[in-house]
Amino acid sequence: MKNENYRAGFVGLIGLPNSGKSTLMNALVGEKVSIVSDKPQTTRRRQVGLLSTKEYQAVFVDAPGLISAKKGLHEFLHQEALDVIRDSDVLICVLNIDEKEPKRLMEIVELAKESGKPYMVVIHKTDLPLLHRPQILRNDLESLGVPIVSGSSSTKGDQVELKEKILDVLPSLIPNSPAPLFLEDLYTPSTVKELTVEVIREKCFELIHQEVPFGIAVRPLLFDEGSPKITRIFCEILVSKENHVSIVVGRKAALIKEIGMKARKEIEKLVGTKVFLDLKVSAYKNWDRSSHVMKELGYVQPQH
């Protein structure tokens, strides 16, 4: 029986690209839900993670970093971020102090303020040698009268400390609810198939060090869980230029093998069986501007 003060709601994490939203969400949930990379625009679709206690359920939504709207994939990413702001009950503005254009940080806060939703601010990456910036940000923010916490996610200890600071404040911002929004034993509503695609994409971002990663997408071809002992997965890695195929494959197929090996180990933890993973690389020129391919990959806005 839930108490009368039980709370549940959607908590949107918003910020600029590379602000550390995904790392922060994983720390808050206590499980890996969002893929993490030091490359910008890693998050493409909103990722959802759940934190359930006896007093509340926080449904964290990791939005793509806010960028200027352009055509194709850029436009989708921009709209995804705006939709998270619109659909959330509470917003957490994640402000990274190493942002090259610090004035843009206040633009994120203004978006939260204009939404009319309750919000809080996390000044992130305070372990970096920019000692003056956190205080400058605090000075700019204090007039708004919203909760402000600061910290880093660079180590497990830092993550625990920052999580505690956030959770000291956040529950009071979440609306009352008669019941949780999702089953309390879940940590994400995402399917294993969706998580598998994200793992493969993460390994591409991690291991490919040229300009290729942003032009990469992963298309699942077959996901066979028919055997209790082995899961067979066939996926296609799409690149937007023909000459990127050889980069992703690598010399003597060394790179694609390493991507597959690292992804397979992580996917096995997700599915609980041995995994046979087959990856092929194909070029589809300017797939990120093709409405047909973008729709097939799930990069389309839902109809409201």
Image (spheres, grey):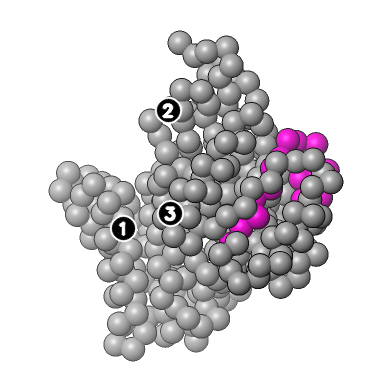
Residue 261 as seen in the image, left or right of residue 235: left
Residue pictured at 76% horizontal, 70% vertical: 101
Which quarter of the rendering shows the N terminus? Answer: top left
Which of the two labelled residues, at mark 1 and mark 3, occupies the earlier sequence position? 3
Query: Residue 179: x, y in percent?
Result: 53, 19
Q: Secondary structure at mark 2?
A: loop
Q: CA distance from mark 1 to mark 3?
A: 23 Å
Residue 231 as seen in the image, left or right of residue 137: left
- Is residue 207 visible to us here? yes
Query: Residue 27: x, y in percent?
Result: 47, 49
Residue pictured at 75% horizontal, 54% vertical: 138
Q: Which residue is mark 2?
A: 184
Can you name the residue that lies furthest to the bottom here?
251
Residue pictured at 54% horizontal, 34% vertical: 58
Q: Which amino acid, mark 2? A: Glu
- Is residue 76 visible to us here? no
Query: Residue 233: x, y in percent?
Result: 30, 57
Which of the two labelled residues, at mark 1 and mark 2, occupies the earlier sequence position? 2
Q: Which mark is residue 266?
A: 1
Which of the two labelled residues, at mark 2 and mark 3, occupies the earlier sequence position? 3
Whether label 1 touches label 3, CB < 8 Å: no
188 drawn magenta: no
118 drawn magenta: yes
In terms of depth relative to the viewer, which is nearer, 98 or 80?
98
Q: Which residue is mark 3?
A: 157
> For the magenta stretch, what is the residue range?
108-125
